[in-house]
């Protein structure tokens, strides 16, 4: 199985990504790491612990960065609620995090692992950037960074910027200039994956505790998308990362040169993607362009069904 570390800021869609990964035999999840983002680090970490227990997994959870490298901290309670995971009843986790900081865990694990490790961040890239700065040697044993963030077109937190990119643009810059192969799954792709009511019902129809939990997450997540965009469901951003690892044939990607706008102005955090290669610059990311949404949701339902 492919060794992976999942790094995220759960977050409704982060949770679905973790659940998808932990039930997929193609992957060996070495650890779960958390970062500030949708809500503060204490809450994203608690939500990760809840998710691990829901999945009945033993995988270690490590807490990471509680703030971005340079810019002021932002958060997304407006989308995910005060808990970061509003909607379902949230149990109290019984097992705690490990003592080791997420960045140290990533560095140690990547260095020690006999095979190249794939990093799957679905939040601000602070932990990944810090790991690459702390231990540049790990780049050679990172197979790929599969990131949900950015966009080839418009943003969702400012007109120009997607939330994860805006939350730590300097970290995203470090990752995109690291030389490690990157897959960037941005809003232009994730807005093709809408969890409309029939798709939510498919999880409810599983009639399992995890199926119900997921359906309640998606029902809450839909509200913001209905109000903001007029869509009949939430855009399931983060699980596209693991789904791409599992079933790349459901997606199209295209190599592009992507640059972070770090200037202090209305475009800060924009991932300027050279879709037509007008700069002639060598690509630094495989950018997702097309999503087979029916295939993606069928995969999710099939894998979530494995939780009994
Ligand atoms: C991203 O921001 C968060 O709200 C989601 O979890 C996702 O990672 C989408 O812009
Ligand atoms: Ca996220």
Image (tube, rainbow, N blue to C red):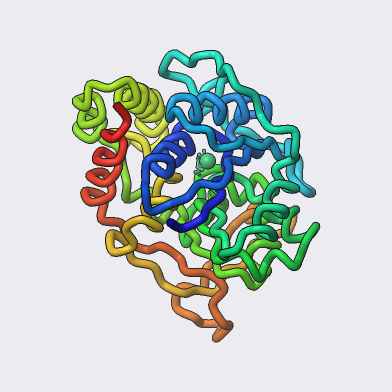
Residue visible at 51% across and 55% down? 3
Q: Measured from the top left, where is residue 222 in percent x and y? A: 36, 29
Residue 168 seen in the figure:
yes
Q: For the N terminus, which image quadrant?
A: bottom left
Q: Residue furthest bottom?
A: 280
Image quadrant assignment for residue 244: bottom left
Q: Measured from the top left, where is residue 225 in percent x and y? A: 39, 34
Q: For the C terminus, which image quadrant?
A: top left
Image quadrant assignment for residue 84: top right
Residue visible at 32% across and 20% down? 209
Residue visible at 48% across and 32% down? 57
Residue visible at 32% across and 50% down? 192
Left or right: 180 as drawn, with respect to 278? right
72 w.r.t. 294: above or below: above
229 w.r.t. 47: above or below: below
Q: Residue furthest front?
A: 114
Residue 158 seen in the figure:
no
Which residue is more in the foreground, 180 or 186? 180
Q: Measured from the top left, where is residue 262 in percent x and y? A: 71, 59
Which residue is more in the foreground, 202 or 230? 202
Left or right: 104 as drawn, with respect to 160? right
Number of residue marks: 0
Q: Measured from the top left, where is residue 198 in percent x and y? A: 19, 32
């Amino acid at each position: 199985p492919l060794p992976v570390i999942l790094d995220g800021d759960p977050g409704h869609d982060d949770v679905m990504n973790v659940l998808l990964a932990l039930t997929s035999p193609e992957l060996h999840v070495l650890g779960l790491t958390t970062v500030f983002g949708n809500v503060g680090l204490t809450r994203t970490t608690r939500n990760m612990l809840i998710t691990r227990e829901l999945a009945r997994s033993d995988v270690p959870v490590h807490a990471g960065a509680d703030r971005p490298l340079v810019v002021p901290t932002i958060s997304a309670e407006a989308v995910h609620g005060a808990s970061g995971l509003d909607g379902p009843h949230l149990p109290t986790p019984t097992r705690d995090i490990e003592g080791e900081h997420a960045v140290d865990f990533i560095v140690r694990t990547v260095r020690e692992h006999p095979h190249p490790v794939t990093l799957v961040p679905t939040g601000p890239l602070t932990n990944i950037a810090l790991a690459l700065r702390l231990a540049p040697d790990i780049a050679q044993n990172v197979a790929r960074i599969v990131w949900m963030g950015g966009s080839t077109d418009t943003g969702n937190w400012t007109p120009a910027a997607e939330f994860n990119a805006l939350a730590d643009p300097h970290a995203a810059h470090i990752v995109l200039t690291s030389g490690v192969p990157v897959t960037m799954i941005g809003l232009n792709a994730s807005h093709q994956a809408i969890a409309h009511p029939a798709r939510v019902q498919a999880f409810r129809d599983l009639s399992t505790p995890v199926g119900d939990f997921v359906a309640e997450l998606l029902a809450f997540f839909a509200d913001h998308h209905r109000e903001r965009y007029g869509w009949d469901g939430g855009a399931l951003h983060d699980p596209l990362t693991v789904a791409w690892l599992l079933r790349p044939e459901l997606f199209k990607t295209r190599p592009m040169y992507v640059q972070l706008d770090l200037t202090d102005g209305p475009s800060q955090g924009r991932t300027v993607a050279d879709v037509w290669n007008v700069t002639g610059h060598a690509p630094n990311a495989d950018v997702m362009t097309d999503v087979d949404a029916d295939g993606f949701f069928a995969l999710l339902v099939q894998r979530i069904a494995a939780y009994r």
